[in-house]
Amino acid sequence: MPKVNEEHFAMKENHIVEAAIRVCKRKPAYDVTLRDVVKESGISQGSMYCYFSSIDEIFAAIANKCYRETNPEGGVEKIFEREGSPEAIIETVFKTWGQVIEKKYTVYGKLINDINTIYYNDPERAKTISALIAVENGVDKIDAMLVAFIGKNIENGYFKPTTPKEYILLAVAMALQGIQRALSAAEEDRDNYLDFIGLDEEHRSAQSMATALFKVVIALLKNERSND
């Protein structure tokens, strides 16, 4: 395909994906149909099939776009390969995680979570979209590598926490997921939940929550009392 045609195709594809994102911000993702996207994008049904043949293909394209735009520059592995103490690396990981999450929810809101929920509840349909997602989910990879990194540095004796390793790793994994769920909730529900747990306005961003979590985790790992 000539370069000009490739560029035109990519522009059209992106136009359709952006239209789908707008639709998904107005109505639940599980209610969005290919017809909705056709109407929003302003292209004909026939032309749509030149780019996407199903809403699943469009959802996969949205996920790929999100992961491409929000993944850490240079890849997740680069964060863990930097020089420094385990504490410094863990701090950088939490900071990077907060930046990625902040960008993800600022641009896409709860859309990616809603799309994931659709396929979580429909395993057969999930096989279709999984084959179409070509970009790695940086958030999931950071979560997994962080838990493994902390576990390794407990096992090798660098950290000697009095709290069992399994409890710490479970707490980290659940806290990371919990922050994402809080951020993906409707604004009123999120505010009510954060009010309920007593989190002040200063600590309600993904960045500040990640920083607070880092301090708690390090205090657990080093058997220290967190002063913040």
Image: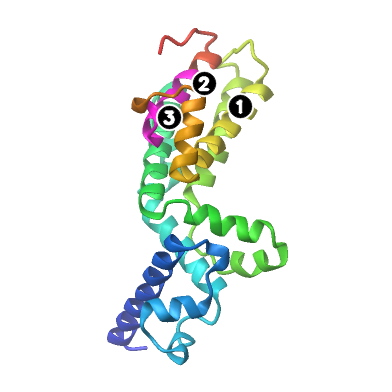
Give the tally of numbered discs. 3
Q: Which mark is residue 76?
A: none
Location of mark 3 (residue):
209
Alpha-carbon span between mark 3 and mark 1: 14 Å
Question: Crowding at label 1, few (<14), some or many (≥20) Cα neighbours within 10 Å?
Answer: some
Q: Which mark is residue 217?
A: 2
| Position in image of residue 114 (x %, y %) | 54, 56
Nearer the observer, disc 2 or disc 3? Answer: 3
Tag 2: amino acid: Val
Task: From the viewer's perspective, tell me whether residue 143 is left or right of residue 199.
Answer: right
Asked if 70 appears above or below 217 in the picture, the reply is below
State which quadrant residue 7 falls in.
bottom left
Tag 3: amino acid: Met
State which quadrant residue 131 falls in.
bottom right
Can residue 209 be seen here? The reply is yes
Q: In percent of the image, x 43 and y 29: which residue is there?
A: 209
Residue 6 magenta-highlighted:
no
Tag 1: amino acid: Ala
Image quarter of the N terminus: bottom left
Asked if 127 appears above or below 168 in the picture, the reply is below
Can residue 85 be seen here? The reply is no
| Position in image of residue 192 (x %, y %) | 48, 33
Start and end of the magenta stretch? 203-216
Location of mark 1 (residue):
171
Determine whether label 1 and label 2 are within 8 Å by CB: yes
